[in-house]
Amino acid sequence: MLAQPHTRMTAEERRQSIVQAAMHVFAEKGFARATTRDLAEAAGISEALLYRHFSSKEAIYEGIQDCICDRRAPVMEELGKQAVSTLGLVLVIYTMHRLIASRSVEAEPAHTATSRLMVQSCLEDGHFVKSFHDARFARIVPYFEQCADAAREAGDLVAGPMSDAERFWFAQHVAVGLCLAEMPPELPYNYQQPDPLKRRRHAYFFALRGIGLTDDAIARHAESDELHAAFAALNLDR
C-alpha cells in the first residue's frame, strides 16, 4: 500500500500554527520569560523556520493579539450598531458576560490560554491587555455611554458617582473576575452555587444592578425575548 504524500502547510497555515502554539507558551511563561526557542519547540519547528515567518518574538505576540481580536470582531462591530436604548445597555452586559465568563464554563484550551495571557500581561507591563481592549471595545464603550444616556432619560438608570465608562469597565471586571476564579481545577471560593452556568447568570445580574439599572428595568429586559432575539442576531448561541 502506497504511503500518502505529506501535505506541506501553506505560509499562512504555518503562521497560524506558530501563533496557536505560541499562545500557550506566553500564557504559561509570560512575554519576558518566553524565548524564541520555547516558541519554536512548541510549534514543532526550528528557530530558523520560525524567523522565516516572524521577524521577532514581538511580532508573534502581535500576531496573537490580531488572532484573538479578529475572532470576535464581527460581534463587536454588530453590537455597536444596535438601537440606542435601555435594552442595548443590557445587551452589551449580556454579550460581554457570555463572551468572557463562558471561557471558564467551556474550559476550551484557547479560552484558558487567552485568560492566562491576560493575567501574565497584567503581571508584566499590561500592553497585551491594553491592545486587546483598545481593539475590541473601541466602538462598544461609546455605544454603551449612549445607551446609558437613553436609560437615564427613560428613568431606568439611577445616578451614581462613577462615569458611564466606569460602569462599563466595572461590569467587565465582574465577568473577568469570575472567569479567573473558575480557572483552577478546584474553586478557591465557596460561592455556595455548584452550577457554573447559574454562577455566570448570577454574575450577569450582579453587573446589571452594579451599573445602576432599576429593578423594573432589569425585570423588563434581563431575560426578555427581545434580548435573546438581539443576541441571536449577533450569531452567538443563546
Image: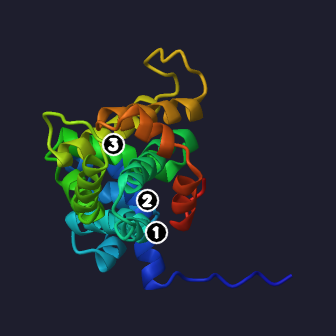
Q: Which numbered disc, 3 or 1, marks the residue closer to the eye?
A: 3
List x then y, in percent, for residue 33.
Answer: 23, 46
Q: What amino acid is found at the position of numbered circle 1 in the picture? A: Ser
Q: Residue furthest right?
A: 1
* Crowd band around label 3 with a 10 angstrom C-alpha radius: few (<14), some (14–19), many (20+): some
**Mark on residue 17?**
1
Q: Earlier in the sequence, mark 2 or mark 3?
A: 2
Q: What amino acid is found at the position of numbered circle 2 in the picture? A: Ala
* Crowd band around label 1 with a 10 angstrom C-alpha radius: few (<14), some (14–19), many (20+): some
Q: Is residue 178 above or below residue 223?
A: above
Check disc 3 and report the residue beneath it: 156
Q: Is residue 182 above or below residue 172?
A: above
List x then y, in percent, for residue 91.
Answer: 43, 53
Q: Residue at x 35, y 39 (%)?
A: 176
Q: What amino acid is found at the position of numbered circle 3 in the picture? A: Asp
Q: Is residue 174 left or right of residue 20?
A: left
Q: Measure the alpha-carbon separation of dots 2 and 1.
A: 6 Å
Q: Residue at x 29, y 66 (%)?
A: 60
Q: Is residue 237 above or below residue 4?
A: above
